[in-house]
Image (cartoon, rainbow, N blue to C red):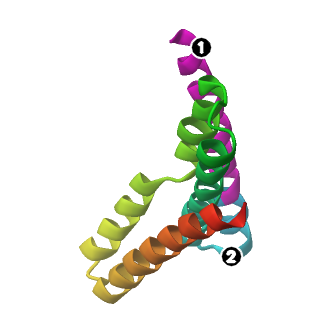
Amino acid sequence: MIKSFLFVAMGGALGASARYGLHVLINQWLSRPMLATLLANSVGCLLMGMAFQWIYQRYPNMDESLRLFITVGFLGALTTWSTFSMETVTLLMENQYAAAMTYFLLTSLLCLGAFFLGTKLL
């Protein structure tokens, strides 16, 4: 049990660091922090779909700690739906209803599509 927690924590630290690095890069290049969240969530969902297919279909006997490291830890920290929610609500609070709806729909569709695509790539 402790081993699993440690693997989740290590994966989470790496996933959160990757997400923050992506945020810094996108914000420096484009000054669009929401694009970084959209990209992190979309890429994270693509990778989660691939991991789901790989782990559960091809390697169902994978060590549980490694599975948790990849899915719950790294990818769970990379895909930050909480940030997505905060940014959507911020747009609503600023009365930017069209932007909020566009952001919500685009993120939802891209992430679901990316997850589905990820299950088909392997």
| Residue at 26% over, 81% down | 95
- The three-letter code of the residue at mark 2 reads Leu
- Can you say whether 20 is above or below 14 in the image? below
The residue that mark 1 highlights is: 3
Disc 1: CA contacts within 10 A as few (<14), some (14-19) or many (>=20): few
Magenta stretch contains residue 4: yes
| Residue at 56% over, 60% down | 45
- The three-letter code of the residue at mark 1 reads Lys
The residue that mark 2 highlights is: 30
Q: Where the C terminus falls, by quadrant?
A: bottom right
- Chain-order first, disc 1 or disc 2: 1
Which residues make up the magenta segment? Answer: 1-22
- Can you say whether 59 is above or below 10 in the image? below
Magenta stretch contains residue 117: no
The circle drawn on residue 86 is none
| Residue at 55% over, 68% down | 116
Instruction: Give the quarter of the image for residue 101.
Output: bottom left
User: Residue 19's spot in the image, x, y percent?
Assistant: 63, 51
- Can you say whether 114 is above or below 83 in the image? below
Between 116 and 98, the one nearer to me in the picture: 116
**Residue 119 visible within the image:** yes
Real-space CA distance between mark 1 and mark 2, rounded to the nearest whole angstrom: 40 Å
Circle 2 sits in a helix, a strand or a loop, which is it?
helix
Instruction: Give the quarter of the image for residue 24.
Output: bottom right
Between 39 and 65, the one nearer to me in the picture: 65
Circle 1 sits in a helix, a strand or a loop, which is it?
helix
